[in-house]
Amino acid sequence: MRAINCRDVFLATAAVAALTLGGCASHADVEKAQATADQALSTAQQAQQTAQQAQQTATTAQQTAEQAMAAAHRAPGPRD
């Protein structure tokens, strides 16, 4: 599982810094860039949470399959 990919967040934040330091951006431009960076971070955090839930589901499924296989091996009856 991957940690949050901060590349997009970094790029958006760098854009905010460049606009601010460059002196050519309006206050509205800087606010819009910051809002975009904030949204990118929020989206990345939501994606990480979804990935963690998927990993947990996969782990549970694997454990269930392993338990079923162990039960099948213990069960009496003819074997192929």
Image: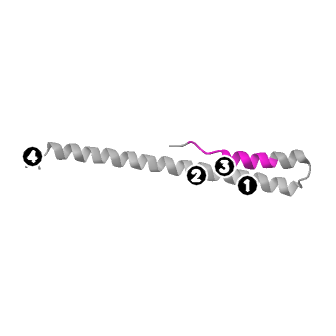
Relative side of 25 to 3, left or right: right
Q: Earlier in the sequence, mark 1 or mark 3?
A: 1
Label 1: few (<14), some (14–19) or many (≥20) C-alpha neighbours in 10 Å: some
Asked if the magenta segment contains residue 14, the reply would be yes
Q: CA distance from mark 4 to mark 1?
A: 62 Å
Q: CA distance from mark 4 to mark 2?
A: 47 Å
Q: Which residue is mark 2?
A: 46
Q: Residue at x 29, y 48 (%)?
A: 65
Relative side of 68 to 80, left or right: right
Q: Residue at x 85, y 49 (%)?
A: 19
Residue numbers of the magenta segment: 3-16
Q: Earlier in the sequence, mark 4 or mark 1?
A: 1
**Where is residue 78 drawn, in percent x and y?**
7, 49
Tell me: residue 13, above or below residue 29: above
**Where is residue 33 drawn, in percent x and y?**
78, 54
Q: Earlier in the sequence, mark 2 or mark 1?
A: 1
**Residue type highlighted by circle 3:** Leu
**Residue type highlighted by circle 1:** Thr
Q: Which label sits on residue 76?
A: 4
Q: Earlier in the sequence, mark 2 or mark 3?
A: 3
Label count reads 4
Q: Which residue is mark 3?
A: 41
Q: Residue furthest front?
A: 80
Query: Marks 4 and 1: CB-CB under 8 Å?
Result: no
Q: Residue at x 19, y 45 (%)?
A: 71
